[in-house]
Amino acid sequence: MKEQQLKILKVMNEATSRMDINMFAQAVNLTPEQAIEQVHILANEAFLRKVGAGYGLTEKGKNALKISAQVPEEKAFCFYVAFDKPLGFSSRSIEEFYRTIKQVTSDSIDFHLYRGDFERWIEEVLQDNELADVVGELEGYGLTGEELRKALLKAIDARYGVGDLL
């Protein structure tokens, strides 16, 4: 999703009153014509839905905002392969976490899952108890390596539809 489209979703989500097209376009730094075009694209892709004379966010639109919301740098999830062996990857959002899970070594995924690191970060930093519970349950399945990676990605995707949004 384009940064401009995320900005449109964010402005629509945070709006406390109705805006005419000129106010909206100014708020998202576009011309009225460009704003209308982007809103139509977002509606066609099911991020927005028609509500009376205007538009509102769909669940998919709300999820797009959730997965892109960044936590402060000091709360980023830092990936390791073992104690004192950082990989140099970190994630500040669900989107970054999902993308990083796809590329880090499976040893790192095993290391963090079985220590409860993923579950704890998701619960405490992202404040998503539902996803934290599902990730915590993965420990009981005894999965490792690529099977564990796939299960973790599937859990995140099931919660947020990340695969559809990226």
Image: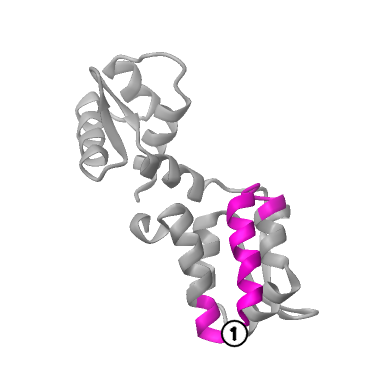
Mark 1, residues whose alpha carbon is within 10 Å: few (<14), some, or many (≥20)? some
Q: Is residue 86 magenta?
A: no
Is 130 rendered above or below residue 156? Answer: above
Residue at the front extreme?
Answer: 140
Which one is in front, 21 or 52? 52
In percent of width and height, residue 106 lies at 58, 83
- Is residue 100 something one can see in this rendering? yes
Which one is in front, 53 or 84? 53
Which image quarter holds the C terminus?
bottom left
Quarter residue 83 falls in = bottom right
Which one is in front, 73 or 154? 154
In percent of width and height, residue 61 lies at 38, 41
Is 142 rendered above or below residue 9? Answer: below
Instruction: Tell me what residue is drawn at x 32 percent, y 41 percent.
Output: 47
Quarter residue 136 falls in = bottom right
Instruction: Tell me what residue is drawn at x 52 percent, y 77 percent.
Output: 149
- Tell me the SS state at disc 1: loop
Amino acid on which the number 1 mark rests in the picture: Thr
Quarter residue 157 falls in = bottom left
In percent of width and height, residue 6 lies at 40, 41
- Is residue 80 something one can see in this rendering? no
Question: What colouring does the structure picture have?
Answer: one colour
Magenta stretch prevailing secondary structure: helix
Instruction: Tell me what residue is drawn at x 27 percent, y 32 percent.
Output: 49
Going by the image, does 14 lie left or right of 39? right
Q: Does the magenta stretch include residue 143?
A: yes
Going by the image, does 121 lie left or right of 149? right
In percent of width and height, residue 46 lies at 27, 42
Give the labeled residue for mark 1. 144
Which one is in front, 32 or 111? 111
Magenta span of residues:
123-149
